[in-house]
Amino acid sequence: MPKLNTANPEVKEYLLEVSSYWIKEFDIDAWRLDVANEVDQPFWREFRTTVKNIKPDLYILGEIWHDSMPWLRGDQFDAVMNYPFTNQVFRLVASQTINAREFTEEMTAIYHSYPTNVFDVTFNLLGSHDTPRIFTDCGKI
């Protein structure tokens, strides 16, 4: 992926214009922001202000593979891809490296790592273009 200098005013203006265009012209309901942790947080704050001013109920989903709380304080993303959830399901079902008690403990820790209003809208997935498919890891396909 290209690395853009979002501190550059022209780059920032262009990206915010593109974001606004898709909302205004096609009435999109959400943005999924790939590799979001590789873009500076001041840009995401401005992005949120820009898109929420156009459509206040727009859902902003960031793809971050590790602790995501710095992006979930109400000034950047509404939620993130919940890869810790995915990892624990794979450990229980596919690789069978944890038992039900360990799975419950891990999932409880994940649940308590986010405020309820964030966890309730987090994107829990079992596979995507970025992860192995669960059937593949289970040896089914």
Image: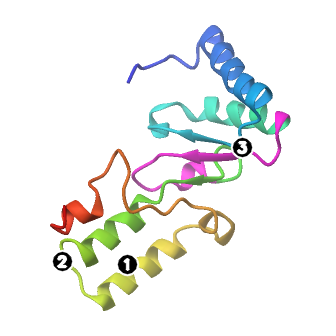
Q: Secondary structure at mark 3?
A: loop
Three-letter amino acid code at the position of disc 2:
Thr
- For residue 70: magenta? yes
- Which quarter shows the N terminus? top left
Which comes before the other along the chain, label 1 or label 3? Answer: 3
Q: Secondary structure at mark 1?
A: helix
Calculate the distance from the C-alpha at mark 2 to the C-alpha at mark 1.
13 Å
* Residue 79 place in picture, x, y as percent: 60, 54
**What segment is highlighted magenta in the picture?**
54-72
Which residue is located at x 19 percent, y 67 percent?
140
Which disc number belongs to residue 139?
none
For label 3, the residue is 29
Calculate the distance from the C-alpha at mark 2 to the C-alpha at mark 3.
38 Å
* Residue 24 place in picture, x, y as percent: 80, 27
In the image, which is nearer the foreground, mark 1 or mark 3?
3
- Which quarter shows the C terminus? bottom left
The residue closer to the viewer here, 46 or 133, is 133
Which comes before the other along the chain, label 2 or label 1? Answer: 2
Which residue reaches farthest left?
139
Which residue reaches farthest top?
10
Three-letter amino acid code at the position of disc 3:
Asp
In the image, which is nearer the foreground, mark 2 or mark 3?
3
- Colour mode? rainbow
For label 1, the residue is 106
The reply, left or right, for residue 37 in relation to residue 11 is left
Which residue is located at x 36 percent, y 57 percent?
127
**Residues at badges 2 and 1 in contact (C-beta under 8 Å)?**
no
For label 2, the residue is 97
Q: Secondary structure at mark 2?
A: loop
Calculate the distance from the C-alpha at mark 1 to the C-alpha at mark 3.
32 Å
Which comes before the other along the chain, label 2 or label 3? Answer: 3
The reply, left or right, for residue 28 in relation to residue 82 is right
